[in-house]
């Protein structure tokens, strides 16, 4: 948490005029990646069977990713004017979300740990994209 607060304080000057969706996207994806990276220790600490644990983790991560995906699309001011790279991320997120949800439903059991880690990397990558937007924000424009 201290790291996130430090980052926000450090770029506070650049936040003037920043579209709230960029900051919201950064916080949702980065905090999600952080939270879900710590969740396996908790789940395995409860003594849940390995296969079931990965299935639950994938399902939870898939639902979270679906929530932030739907939130972003429903709150974006104008989808027609979304930058091309954001369109690529939005479209490429669909199979990532689907893989996590399918693993959560019990398919791809042998690959569930890999799918979970792919989901974490995806959230981290999207978080880096949003953070880059925050850094490159020019309040004068």
Image (cartoon, rainbow, N blue to C red):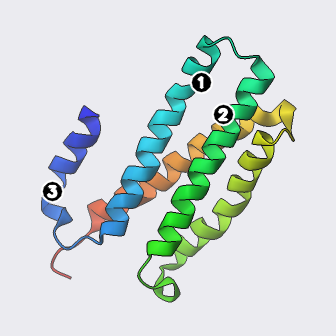
The residues tagged by marks 2 and 3 sit, at their Cα atoms, a distance apart of 34 Å
Q: Give the side of residue 132 with respect to residue 118, left or right.
A: left
Q: Give the side of residue 124 with respect to residue 108, left or right.
A: left
Q: Position of residue 54 (x, y in %)?
A: 72, 29
**Foreground of the two, 135 or 31:** 31
Q: Can you say which quadrant of the picture contains the N terminus?
A: top left
| Residue beneath the point at 16% across and 48% down | 9
Task: Name the mark on residue 9.
Answer: none
Residue 93 placement: quadrant: bottom right
**Earlier sequence position, callout 2 versus callout 3:** 3
Number of numbered labels in the structure image: 3
Depicted 125 relative to depicted 16: above or below: above
The residues tagged by marks 1 and 2 sit, at their Cα atoms, a distance apart of 7 Å
Q: Secondary structure at mark 1?
A: helix
Depicted 10 relative to depicted 43: above or below: below
Q: Position of residue 23 (x, y in %)?
A: 32, 60
Badge 3 is on which residue?
A: 12
Badge 1 is on which residue?
A: 40
| Residue beneath the point at 75% across and 33% down | 55
Badge 2 is on which residue?
A: 57
Q: Give the side of residue 128 with respect to residue 137, left or right.
A: right
Q: Is residue 65 visible?
A: yes
**Earlier sequence position, callout 1 versus callout 3:** 3
Classify 10 Å Cα crowding around label 3: few (below 14), some (14-19), many (20 and above). Answer: few
């Amino acid at each position: 948490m201290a790291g996130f607060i430090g980052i926000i304080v450090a770029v506070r000057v650049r936040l003037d005029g920043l579209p709230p969706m960029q900051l919201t996207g950064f916080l949702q994806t980065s905090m999600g990646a952080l939270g879900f990276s710590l969740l396996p220790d908790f789940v395995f600490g409860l003594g849940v069977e390995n296969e079931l644990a990965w299935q639950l983790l994938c399902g939870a991560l898939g639902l979270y990713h679906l929530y932030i995906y739907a939130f972003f699309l429903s709150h974006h001011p104008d989808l027609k004017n979304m930058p091309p790279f954001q369109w690529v991320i939005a479209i490429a997120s669909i199979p990532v979300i689907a893989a996590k949800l399918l693993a959560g439903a019990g398919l791809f059991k042998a690959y569930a740990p890999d799918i979970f880690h792919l989901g974490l990397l995806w959230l981290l990558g999207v978080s880096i994209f949003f953070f880059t937007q925050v850094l490159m924000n020019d309040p004068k424009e």
